[in-house]
Amino acid sequence: MDDLDARLLLLLTDAPRLGVLECARRLGVARGTVQARLDRLAERGVLAGFPPELNLAAMGYGLTAFAVLEIAQGRRARVIEALSAIEQVCEAHATTGQGDLFVRLVARDHDDLQRVIDEMVSVPDVLRTSTSMALSTPIPPRVRPLLERLAQETKSR
C-alpha cells in the first residue's frame, strides 16, 4: 500500500457511498486510477466490501455482550458452525488464554440475552462460558487511525 491507497481508503471510510468518479475528483487522479486501486485492494483482501454501518440499538438490539467460551479440544469448527446459526451472534474470534472463543452478541433486553446465552451454552462441546455486558462503547470499531498512520509512513518514505 502507498499514500494514494491510504488516502483512498480514508476517503471511503469517511464517505463510503462515494462513487469512483467523485473519489477521483477529490483525490486529484484519473477515474481509471481509482478503479484500478480499488480492484487491486479488493484482490489483495484489503478492501472486503462496502457494508453499511448499522446502529443495532436503533434496530431494537440495545444490549451488547461479550462471551468467553471454553470448548472441547478439537471441536472448534463444530462449535463455530453451531454459533453461526444463532442470529444474534455478531462475531467470534479464536483466542489464546483463558477461553477458546471470544464472542460478541446482541440482544433486545435481559430476557433475550439470557435466551441467547442459553442457546450458546446448549451447543455441544461448549464446556463453560463467561459473559459480560457492555455498558457503553466509548471507542467504536475503527480503522481511521491505522490508515492515517499508514498514509504518514508512506508519505515520509
Image (cartoon, rainbow, N blue to C red):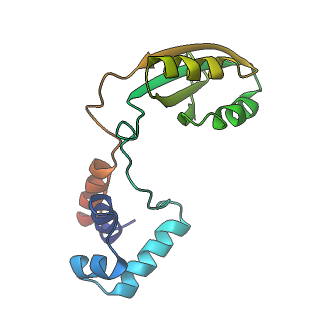
Q: Is residue 144 left or right of residue 121?
A: left
Look at the picture and state if 44 lies above or below 106.
Answer: below
Image quarter where the N terminus lies is bottom left
Look at the picture and state if 34 lies above or below 3.
Answer: below
Q: Is residue 5 left or right of residue 75?
A: left
Give the quarter of the image for residue 121.
top right
| Residue located at (51% from left, 67% from top) | 42
Image quarter where the C terminus lies is bottom left
Q: Nearer the viewer, residue 21 or 123?
A: 123
Residue 89 location (% of width, % of height): 55, 33
Instruction: Count the numbered circles shown.
Output: 0
Q: Nearer the viewer, residue 130 or 9?
A: 130
Residue 13 location (% of width, % of height): 32, 58
| Residue located at (27% from left, 48% from top) | 145
Look at the picture and state if 57 lies above or below 144.
Answer: above
Residue 102 location (% of width, % of height): 54, 27
Residue 17 location (% of width, % of height): 34, 67
Q: Nearer the viewer, residue 37 or 68?
A: 68
